[in-house]
Amino acid sequence: MVVAPARDHGRQAAKSAANRVFTGGSFQASQQMTSGKVALRTCQAGFSRLSWRMDSLGKARLVIETEIDGLRRMSGLLGEGFVEAVGMLQDTLNQRGKIVVVGVGKSGNIGHKIAATLNSTGATAVVMDSQNALHGDLGLLSDGDAVLALSYSGETRELLDLLPFIKRFEVKVISLTGKPESTLSRLSDITLDTSVEREACPLNLAPTSSSTAMLVMGDALAMVLLESRGFTEDDFARFHPGGSLGRALLTRVSDIMRSDAALPTVNEDGDVFAALDAMNGARAGACLILAPDGGLAGIFTHGDFARGFRKDPQLGGKPVASLMTRNPIAVQADALAVEVLKTLGQNRIDDIVVLDADNKPVGLIDTQDLARLKIV
């Protein structure tokens, strides 16, 4: 057996060690390059998402501005035709007729919303499906009704096929269309122009600006008609009995006020301690201060106490009259709860005094009571 010289073994060991160092270094360098590429790709993805986000916000604002421009244009086109349309609708309702809304596709969807708005403001309205109308639903229509016909092009075949049968009734037709020279317009008694220069759709195809314009024209009709008919908040309440809005419109102040044992009161000659005891006993944030004749002298609130305490920590024995608010804001017991909401919001107060017909204090309403009773 041949034995390699010792120096050969040394060379081989050195080469092996050098190779390990070189290989390890390459691996570390490779790792660093890979990490750099990942970081670069992550950065690029981040910039891409940021760019996409900024681009999306810009596009969204463009859509909104385009639709606003369309509404401004439509506002400028309003004329006597609108006034005549409101008068026609009012005459229809005065004669116990109804408003029949008809449209196809997106215009039909808008028609449902317009009819809902009219109904909620006391103007009787129904939606008639163009297709079903040719198969019996024309029974919805009666002499003396008014028809709102919706079609942006004014050439919707289903609607035009229906119009001759509608015209057999003694009804008036008001069209909402973006094409005042269209067939629908020619067959209508009044045309309301809802034309827009372009859709908000980047392809200028999907109904966007045009459908918004039609919806807003319907809102304008409903709101002006509401005022011309003398529609009031009490009337509105009759048609909205549900939800917090209905509760606010139907509920009377006397139904929700704190009264009797739950009403904290103290005589005008009482001290601050007495007022605080009354407030704590009723778990209220204010106390009514009564004059010798039982009338209202003022109101003392936790806010009044906090402000007074900062100036004089020993104010407990002082006359409450020296810290109370005189002539506080008040509402009548027979007013609607919605009046309380308005008063609280306008005056930025948390408590409001309730007076009876003789202006005697009979109750107190705290904003917390409104939340608990789901009035707000």
Image: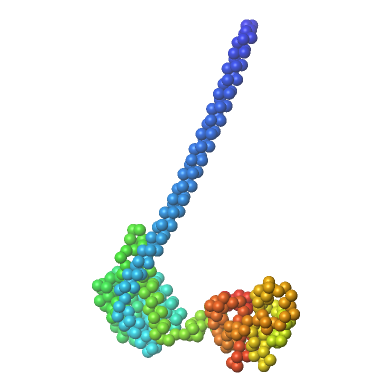
Residue 343 makes an appearance in the image:
yes
Q: Quadrant of the C terminus?
A: bottom right
Residue that extends furthest to the front in the rendered view of this protein: 311
Residue 98 position, x and y percent, is 39, 84
Residue that extends furthest to the top in the rendered view of this protein: 2
Residue 321 position, x and y percent, is 68, 83
Taking the image as shown, residue 236 lies to the left or right of residue 203, namely: right
Q: Quadrant of the N terminus?
A: top right
Question: Where on the picture, by quarter, is residue 317?
Answer: bottom right
Q: How is the image coloured?
A: rainbow
Question: Where on the picture, by quarter, is residue 290?
Answer: bottom right
Q: How many marks?
A: 0
Residue at 68% across, 78% down: 284
**Above-or-below relation of 297 to 41:** below
Residue at 28% across, 71% down: 179
Residue at 34% across, 84% down: 87
Residue at 26% across, 72% down: 182
Taking the image as shown, residue 339 lies to the left or right of residue 2, namely: left
Residue 315 position, x and y percent, is 72, 77
Residue 102 position, x and y percent, is 36, 75
In this rendered view, identify the residue nearer to me: 109 or 58.
58
In this rendered view, identify the residue nearer to me: 343 or 113.
343
Residue 262 makes an appearance in the image:
no
